[in-house]
Image (tube, rainbow, N blue to C red):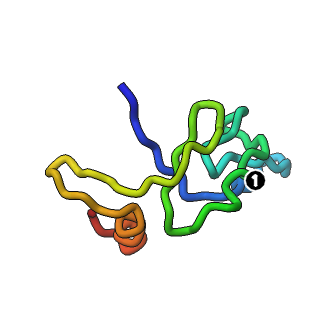
Amino acid sequence: MARVVVYEGKGPVEVKLVDGSIVWLCGCGLSVTFPFCSGRHIRTYSEDDDGIYAYDRDGNLLGRIRKIVLEDGREISPESLVRARLRGEEA
């Protein structure tokens, strides 16, 4: 079974530990050292903010998703899904 996980970040998240040290956590989902950042987020810099993109297991861009078909048969654009999520709504 496959699943789709959406990461909205285009860069790492800085976390300061109790001892004062800093670690960088992956915010894009492409890291080879997940949950820590490996620098692969640079692959996301060319993405449009309102698009949804698909990557393979090796972090290679497969392309932009153009259409989403929901369980009830409705077809929506990724852009409308992203806008709804930003407003805190269901698609």
Query: x, y (%) of residue 31?
Result: 69, 39
Residue 15 visible in the snapshot: no
Q: Quadrant of residue 74?
A: bottom left
Furthest residue to the bottom?
87
Q: Residue furthest left?
A: 72
Name the kind of residue labelled 1 in the image: Ile
SS label for mark 1:
helix
User: From where the camera sits, is residue 50 visible?
Assistant: yes
Which quarter of the rendered picture does the C terminus lie within?
bottom left
Image side of residue 38 versus residue 81, left or right: right
Q: Which x, y percent locates residue 68?
A: 32, 53
Give the residue pinned by disc 1: 42
- Vertical side of 31 occupied by 24: above or below: below
Q: Residue at x 59, y 31 (%)?
A: 57
Q: Position of residue 17 (x, y in %)?
A: 76, 48
| Location of residue 89 in the rendering, given as x and y in whole percent from the top left corner | 30, 68
Q: Is residue 39 left or right of residue 89?
A: right
Which residue is found at the position 42% from the left and 71% from the top?
86
Measuring 57% from the left and 35% from the top, which residue is drawn there? Answer: 56
Name the residue located 63 percent from the left edge and 50 percent from the top edge: 28
Alpha-carbon neighbours of circle 1 within 10 Å: few (<14), some, or many (≥20)? few
